Image (cartoon, grey):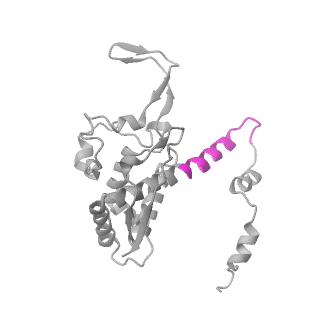
Amino acid sequence: MRKGISPPDQYNERLAGINLLDVVYDNLPVITEDHDWRHELGTLAIAGVDTIHEALSLLLVTLGNYPDVQNKVFMEIQEVMGDLDRDVTVKDTNAMTYLNQVILESLRLNGSIPAIIRKATKDIKLVGCTLPAGSRIIIALQAMGFDKEQFPNPKQFLPERFSPEKQKERHNYAFLPFSAGPRNCIGKSYAMLMMKTVLVHVLRRLRVTSHTKLSDIKYDLKVVLHHTTPILVSFHPR
């Protein structure tokens, strides 16, 4: 046992019953009685767990259904890292452009957030109508990913849609898995880094086989989209 490192059982015993949010709440000053920092922390905790968990689950079952894509991701991991036994760095994940395309295409088909609501701060003129200031607007994020004009054959899983060349052909707001503008997802960078890192750790050691077809997966439509169909995958050592 290294000096200064507690045994696992002692560590777990010391942490028993400790809640991360409680610790943060107890150590941050309340600026005003109506300050909304508790809501912000709750947003970070919930959005950083449910959405990433759901996205990773669907990414794994998708890769299990598309072994050719999975193999291409593995080859990119090998090319970027060289030594598969070393730690994964942010520089590594940034260099994995095809992995990024795979994640974005999976989010297009199975985005964790189906819709968001925005409020118009001024009158907005559209073709045939004007939205007055103060209007509540529902933006169907998932439906945007199935727009045939922007994404031909939208039900097909094609990571190449998000190659730099293809993305230049679309409007910047044609696909918004993390929303956009000053009110975009606060955890966008964290979520992408987390998904890339987890997938690299899994795929460099294991090959994923899916026993669940993507077309058979059913969902529960809530604030965060959850699959209700059990997802079954197998992991095989490479």
> Looking at the image, which residue is at 68% across and 38% down?
36
Q: Quadrant of residue 139?
A: top left
Q: Quadrant of the N terminus?
A: bottom right
Quarter of the image where the C terminus is located: bottom left
Residue 58 position (above or below residue 223): below
Where 57 sits versus 92, above or below? above
State left or right for residue 33 relative to residue 220.
right
Residue 212 in sight from this viewpoint:
yes
Residue 48 lies, in percent from the top left, at 55, 51
Question: Residues in magenta?
Answer: 31-50
Q: Is residue 8 left or right of residue 164?
A: right
Question: In the drawing, does residue 78 fall left or right of residue 51?
Answer: left
Residue 159: image location, x then y, percent: 29, 52
Q: Main secondary structure of the magenta part?
A: helix
Of 28 and 218, nearer the camera is 218
Is 64 or 171 nearer to us in this picture? 64
Horizontal side of residue 91 vs 75, given as left or right: right
| Residue 42 among magenta residues | yes
Which residue lies at the image location 26% right of the left edge and 62% below the top edge? 68
Q: Residue at x 30, y 62 (%)?
A: 67
How far across and down, in percent of the image, does residue 71 sit? Answer: 29, 66
